[in-house]
Image (cartoon, grey):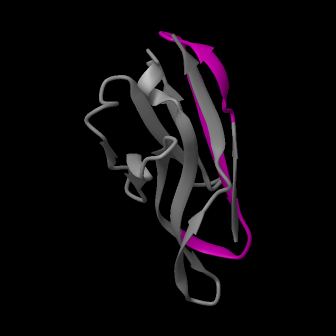
Amino acid sequence: VQLVESGGGLVQAGGSLRLSCAASGSIFSINFMAWYHQAPGKQRVLVAKITSGGRADYADSVKGRFTISRDSAKNTVSLQMNSLKSEDTAVYYCNAEIRSVSGLTFNYWGQGTQVTVSS
């Protein structure tokens, strides 16, 4: 199983970006998918999470600006980021808890994609 992110880049403050993440491999089911970010010198923190049932939760810092969505049929998750601020600058990581066809459940990470917001 692997997660592959796309969509990062450089944007001016107030702008928008959309991140996408696709899960592939021997997937039986996905319990949840999430986005974390990690700024230089800081810990990786949860930005948004969406369950298999579609429940979404957000960090307080992004509520009202970011929207997480998933396509269960395609095993993808997206993060629409609007009204971006300089403090959103970080490497964004896709995360998912996946049950494989073998019946084992593991937590997986993508390789990360850089988001840079210029002020």
Give 70 or 64, whichever is nearer the viewer.
64
Magenta-highlighted stretch: main secondary structure? strand
The answer to whether 11 is drawn above or below residue 28 in the figure is: above
Give 89 or 111, whichever is nearer the viewer.
89
Residue in the image at 64% along x and 37% along y: 114
Numbered-mark total: 0
The answer to whether 15 is drawn above or below residue 60 in the figure is: above
Residue in the image at 68% along x and 33% along y: 7
* Span colored in magenta: 7-29
How far from the left and from the top, in percent, is residue 48? 39, 44
Q: Which residue, as the protein is rendered here, is positioned at the far front? A: 41
Magenta span contains residue 5: no
The answer to whether 35 is drawn above or below residue 29 in the figure is: above
How far from the left and from the top, in percent, is residue 20? 63, 40
Based on the displayed image, in which of its 4 quarters is residue 111 positioned?
bottom right
Q: Which quadrant does the N terminus fall into? A: bottom right
Give 36 or 44, whichever is nearer the viewer.
44
Residue in the image at 66% along x and 32% along y: 8
How far from the left and from the top, in percent, is residue 29? 55, 71
